[in-house]
Amino acid sequence: MQTLQVITLGCSKNTVDTEHLLYQVKDAYEWVPEGEDRAVDVLVINTCGFIGDAKEQSIQTILAAAERKKAGLVGKLMVFGCLSERYASELPALIPEVDGWFGARTLEPLIRALGCRPRSAQSHRRVLTAGNRPYAFLKISEGCNRRCSYCAIPFIRGPHVSVPMEVLVKEAEELAAQGIRELVIIAQDTTYYGLDLYGRRALAELLRKLSAVEGIEWMRIHYSYPAEFPEDVLEEMAHNPKVCRYMDIPLQHIANPVLEKMHRHVDEAWTRELIWRMREKVPGVVLRTTLIVGHPGERTRDFEKLLSFVQEARFPRMGAFAYSEEEGTYDAGHFKDTVRASTKQRRLDRLMEVQRGISLAYNQSRIGSVVRVLVDDFAEGRLVCRSEFESPEVDGEILVKYSPEAFDGVEPYSLVGEFLQVRITAADEYDLTAEVV
């Protein structure tokens, strides 16, 4: 049996694609986990092509793999994913060492190139690539019908295509059977789910069906678009104990002139009203957002409005980025990148400094509270945990010191995937410390 290794770059959606690919070819190859340094017969690279830094990382990874091939450490080298989709006509001539280039919208051509026959009836099955972690990402749709001015995703991934509910339920059942306790719901736009298949926004209905899967205890929602937000999702979050009171909703900006240029289809008033409704209907909900500074034409007063909004809204979780122009987007064809790089960085630094204070205050407000946590790992003598208010891989962690006495002699690694009641005892701007109760 030949050996196969897959290197996955970019976001969690790419991780899901890799795991589906591995299941499709598992009977034909011995899988060599990523990071294991050994010669392989076939190396596949799953690329990201979203922004400049990600594209650069993908190119450098491909070039390094080409050198391994020249040294005889790799037999065949194949590339798929967003970078390959975006630059399909240019890359083959630039890196001839690659034996095959494949896109991001379907796995079937790559599966066939690997000598396997696509098994559509098994499309819900995956080979989990992250050891015994108790959470998994569930990608409920592909592509995006939005046309945000700065974003390349629609012409890379194509239009929105929802995965049927029955397929997602099967996938959740398979994941639960492998020890997964938490599903992180992802897509390019999760709140658009169902419109193409059912003629309605069906995320709330999907959540109800997934919550019936035995073994799944938590579900959290990422990548929710603010325009036309489905209110029934909030009802589900408020009343379904398996839906975490956590919402990732990238807002990008608050100043109306910037929102209009970004083609976000919302304004400041709508955004503020939506945040108010979320917090009213789901008491205690933790909102996570992402923001962009330095969009073309962003004036000083636009940035100051954004800064004031962040101070007022007090998002417990927030990420921010400096705008970078991407070829092929509406921005690249219609606006000049007018904001200096130094100005972008200065604004980003100011915004994140404010956010650090907000995050610290939020975490410190939790000291003394008792929360239910899921154990993700054991490292350096501590159980690495999260509550419903921390999403994996993007938020902080709750660290619980392990001792045999505190856990009645139960070995620490056997606690991974279990739920505990802990009391928060200390906090910094990112992580929290707790003790078992």
Image (cartoon, rainbow, N blue to C red):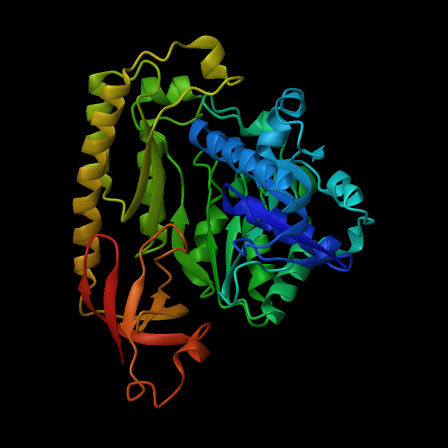
Above or below, 156 relative to 403:
above
Q: Residue at x 40, y 37 (%)?
A: 250
Q: Residue furthest front?
A: 71
Q: Position of residue 204 (x, y in %)?
A: 54, 52
Residue 117 in view, yes or no: yes
Instruction: Reply above or below: 415 against 148.
Output: below
Q: Is residue 133 left or right of residue 388?
A: right
The answer to which quarter of the image holds residue 96 is: top right
Placement of 246 over or under 426, stated as above or below: above
The reply, left or right, for residue 116 in relation to residue 361 is: right
- Front residue of 57/224: it is 57
From the image, which quarter does the N terminus lie in? bottom right
Total numbered labels:
0
Q: Quadrant of the C terminus?
A: bottom left
Residue 145 on image: x %, y %: 58, 29
Asked if residue 145 can be seen in this view, the reply is: no
Kindly indicate the quadrant of the structure image that contains residue 209: bottom right
The foreground one among 145 and 333 is: 333
Quadrant of residue 206 in the image? bottom right
Task: Kindly identify the residue that appears in the image at 48 percent across and 50 percent down.
Answer: 233
Residue 405, given in percent of the width and then of the height, sits at 29, 89
Residue 167, how many percent across, how many down? 70, 55
Residue in front for this viewpoint, 321 or 260: 321
**Against 123, is 343 above or below?**
above
